[in-house]
Amino acid sequence: MNRPVRSSRSSSRSSSRSASPRSRNRRPSTAAAPARVPVPADGNEFSLPPSTTPLLPAVGSFTELDLPAGITAELARQGVTVPFPIQAAALPNALAGRDVLGRGRTGSGKTLAFGLALLARTAEQRAEPRRPLALVLVPTRELAQQVTDALTPYAKPLRLRAATVVGGMSIGRQAAALRDGAEVVIATPGRLHDLIERGDCRLDRVRVTVLDEADQMADMGFLPQVTRLLKQVPADGQRMLFSATLDHNVGQLVRRFLDDPAVHSVDASAGAVTTMEHHVLHIADTDKRTVVTRVAARDGRVIMFLDTKRAVDRLTKHLLASGVRAAALHGGKSQPQRTRTLDYFKTGHVSVLVATNVAARGIHVDDLDLVVNVDPPADHKDYLHRGGRTARAGGSGTVVTLVLPDQRRAMAGLMTDAGITPHTARVNSDDTELTRITGAQAPSGIPVTIDAPATEQKAPAATGQRRGRSRRRGRRTRRSESGLAS
């Protein structure tokens, strides 16, 4: 079927855009909703011109969508019947083949909003070696893994093969997966670029392209790489861009690569989430280490954010010595270490995740009810994404920021930019208010060591030769580690 009518701007991009990919869920134009609700601009965001094509109406249930039977069965098996707002609004238009621009806070359900449409529109097709049919670009390895985990149960019944392409892991294995044929590739820009340069991947058959967390890709300096990759994707394919914020850097991508997109803006910021509490706690510099230690010793899990890798490692070492089961997560860790640490935290093997901003996106932990900014974030976007680790998918949670006297003015401005009016209090380490807000308590004082769970312990290698190969592989892996999101 043909795609919806394009704006006149489309002719400047490609006259072939009218030759559309097949559409699984085209609805009659008489059922279309009125013109889209414009995205509000707060001074830091760009404004879009009105859409020339009316939006299809939102749905109240997944059963209203023309999804493949395999996806519908998996949704039913998981007990998922009612879509989140971003899913209800975006899926009808995404399934119809429209370009989509979606804004929703982290944890709002964006992954299935684009993922189910991507899988449905790729179903019943087979990729040639090295030539995927659908592409999801993400800024970090953790987010790539989360997207892969979220989409795999729905891809399997459709017999769609997915390849995750990220730095810090074996590029040879990733190249082999592409050679075997993968309909869907989930990738960070740097590693995908490397594979293309090696001749292991081509993007000339990609029909559906998604940019997830586009604002972070812009913040991390990936715009040139992303632009080069998008220019290799056929101009008449479908593009979807999802982001928690829509700043001017994202606007460059929208204006250049999205054609008359269906715009859906829900849960514009964490400040709009009524199930999330925000606390700014003023503390003395001399009391900060004790406050942090008591909060970490609470009953229940907590993510603690700090500015630097060195600070993360120092605090983790201190917490372990104090009897708190903590683990560090930052860009200096190898990908296997980072994956193992996240697994430990998700399963409760450790109760405190001490992290830099590497954990601020792409990490979903069920029922996490507390996030602590030990070091205040650099800007309001970092604050919103750190806080987005809690109160996810309709849950509730608390975000606490510890503020020293010389940080108060900057923090007040940051909260204004974020559109949040926090609860503010001055506390010390023995304060009952600190305990009420965070569950802070004294640690045991008995040092702990975090070992691998018994089910993960592996027998030693049988021969010295095998151990030697393992050590060489480890050295190669460490050499290939190239930072946060290669």
Image: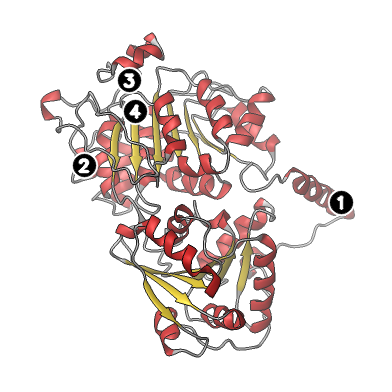
What kind of residue is marked 1? Gly
Height in image: 18 above or below 121?
A: above
Q: Position of residue 53 (x, y in %)?
A: 22, 24
Q: Nearer the viewer, mark 4 or mark 2?
A: 4
Residue type (three-letter) at the residue carrying disc 2: Thr
The residue beneath circle 4 is: 99
Label of residue 372 in the image: none
Residue at horizontal 67 percent and vertical 24 percent from the top: 197
Q: Which residue is mark 3?
A: 22
- Whether residue 389 can be seen here: no
Residue ID for mark 1: 468
Marks 3 and 4, how far apart in space?
14 Å
The residue where tag 2 is placed is: 63
In three-dimensional space, the C-alpha distance between marks 1 and 2, rounded to whole angstroms, equals 55 Å
Which image quadrant is residue 245 in?
top left
Gap between marks 2 and 3 measured at Cα = 21 Å
Q: Nearer the viewer, mark 2 or mark 3?
A: 3
Q: Dot 4 lies on which element? A: loop
Q: Nearer the viewer, mark 3 or mark 1?
A: 3
For marks 4 and 2, the one nearer the N-term is: 2
The picture places residue 19, in percent across and down from the top left corner, at: 34, 12
The colour scheme of the drawn protein is: secondary structure
Q: Is residue 186 left or right of residue 264?
A: right
Around disc 2, counting alpha carbons within 10 Å, would you say few (fewer than 14), some (14 to 19), or many (20 or more)?
Answer: few
Sequence-wise first label, 3 or 1: 3
Q: Which residue is at 67% across, 37% downward?
A: 173
Q: Residue at x 43, y 47 (%)?
A: 150
